[in-house]
């Protein structure tokens, strides 16, 4: 038994310090497009089925409102993973079906697929860059519990940077027109209660969920630009199911073409490589006093400065009556400033 354990340990050690080509070969099986019928297709169809079930039960009047809201939330939560994989062309091997799934998920979420795609790819290109990473603004410009409304910044970023290609501006117009048409119809035909309870409300909850588990937790403390450290992993079977693999977010950043349902096995395969690179593999909320302070700050205020001496929150010191507490406030702002490492 001892000999077997030593052999396993030796094998594990031999995986360290291997070349990048070695690891590329090992990860290759996960980089191939998913099958024609894959779990993401199931999420897409299942999300729409659950959404229609909730609407049907609304008019049948049998199930309580709490159940219907929960069903709507689950449906939208499922589509959040679909739109994410579709924007990386990892939802389906057929590019037209992949596109259809992306647009379909976007419509149910109230998003625009071209906006989500182009803005998200900018995030991948500039992780934790205060000027060029749109998700950095979402995560660091207010309290965590108000993260959902900050997703509207994505639309502003899309037009400010003129990110659209070919027909994407037309696609944006069609999707936004469809959204407005539904709302106008809801007002005219008096079904806004359905929209408020089974669409806008659950969408807000999903926005908070996506914001926390796709944007905030994977990238905090928002300091690393290095590709091996600019996102994190926090292994958990339960979280893997609940948030569909986003607790292995670093794996996604390193190999974006891997579909969500293969993050976990890809992580387990490449763990020796991540260990070697010093990649963060814990949630990192209460690991140190500084972590705890920053997390609590994000819950209640969350506006981060990128220069210690020019915090956006510094003018509030003028409203504090005593010099002692003004100093404490400025000290807090210095401690919570985000100055990413460019290396």
Image: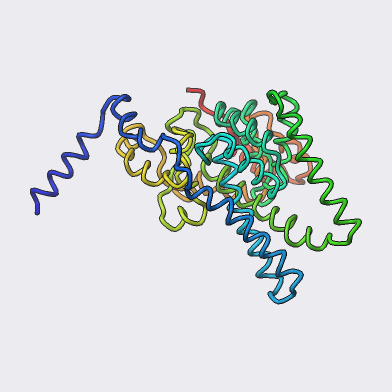
Image x and y of residue 57, in percent: 70, 70
Residue in the foreground of this view, choosing between 200 and 60 = 60
Q: Quadrant of residue 248?
A: top left
- Provide residue 286's location: percent of width, then percent of height: 47, 51
Q: Which quarter shows the N terminus? A: bottom left
> What residue is rendered at 41% in x and 35% in y?
32
Q: Residue at x 72, y 64 (%)?
A: 55
Q: Position of residue 71 (x, y in %)?
A: 63, 63
Q: Nearer the viewer, residue 263 or 250?
A: 263
Task: Say whether residue 112 is left or right of residue 124.
Answer: right
318 left or right of 328 in image: right
Most extreme residue toward the bottom is 62
Q: Report x, y in % for residue 256.
A: 48, 34
Extreme-right residue of the structure: 188
Would you identify the image quadrant in which residue 125 lies? top right
Picture colour scheme: rainbow
Compared to residue 51, the image places residue 82 above or below, namely above
């Amino acid at each position: 038994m001892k000999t077997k354990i030593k052999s396993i340990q030796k094998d594990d050690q031999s995986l360290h310090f291997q070349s990048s080509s070695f690891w590329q070969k090992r990860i290759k099986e996960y980089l191939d497009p998913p099958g024609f019928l894959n779990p993401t297709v199931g999420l897409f169809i299942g999300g729409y089925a659950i959404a229609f079930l909730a609407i049907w039960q609304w008019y049948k009047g049998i199930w309580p409102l709490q159940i219907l809201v929960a069903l709507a939330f689950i449906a939208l939560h499922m589509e959040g993973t679909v739109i994410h994989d579709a924007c990386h062309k990892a939802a389906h091997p057929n590019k037209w079906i992949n596109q259809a799934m992306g647009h379909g998920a976007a419509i149910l979420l109230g998003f625009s697929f071209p906006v989500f795609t182009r803005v998200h790819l900018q995030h991948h290109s500039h992780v934790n860059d205060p000027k060029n990473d749109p998700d950095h603004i979402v995560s660091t410009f207010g309290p965590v519990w108000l993260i959902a409304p900050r997703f509207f910044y994505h639309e502003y970023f899309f037009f400010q940077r003129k990110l659209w290609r070919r027909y994407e501006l037309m696609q944006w117009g069609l999707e936004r027109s469809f959204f407005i048409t539904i709302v106008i119809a809801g007002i005219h035909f008096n079904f806004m209660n359905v929209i408020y309870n089974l669409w806008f409300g659950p969408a807000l909850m999903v926005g908070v969920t996506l914001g926390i588990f796709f944007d905030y937790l994977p990238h905090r403390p928002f300091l690393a630009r290095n590709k091996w450290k600019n996102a994190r992993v926090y292994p958990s079977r339960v979280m893997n199911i609940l948030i569909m693999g986003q607790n292995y977010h670093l794996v996604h950043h390193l190999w974006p073409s891997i579909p969500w349902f293969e993050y976990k096995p890809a992580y387990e395969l490449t763990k020796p490589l991540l260990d070697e690179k010093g990649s963060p593999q814990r949630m990192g909320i209460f690991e140190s006093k500084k972590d705890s302070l920053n997390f609590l700050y994000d819950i209640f205020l969350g506006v981060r400065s990128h220069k210690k001496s020019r915090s956006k929150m510094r003018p509030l010191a003028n409203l504090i009556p005593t010099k002692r507490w003004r100093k404490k406030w400025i000290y807090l702002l210095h401690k919570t400033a985000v100055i990413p490492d460019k290396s």
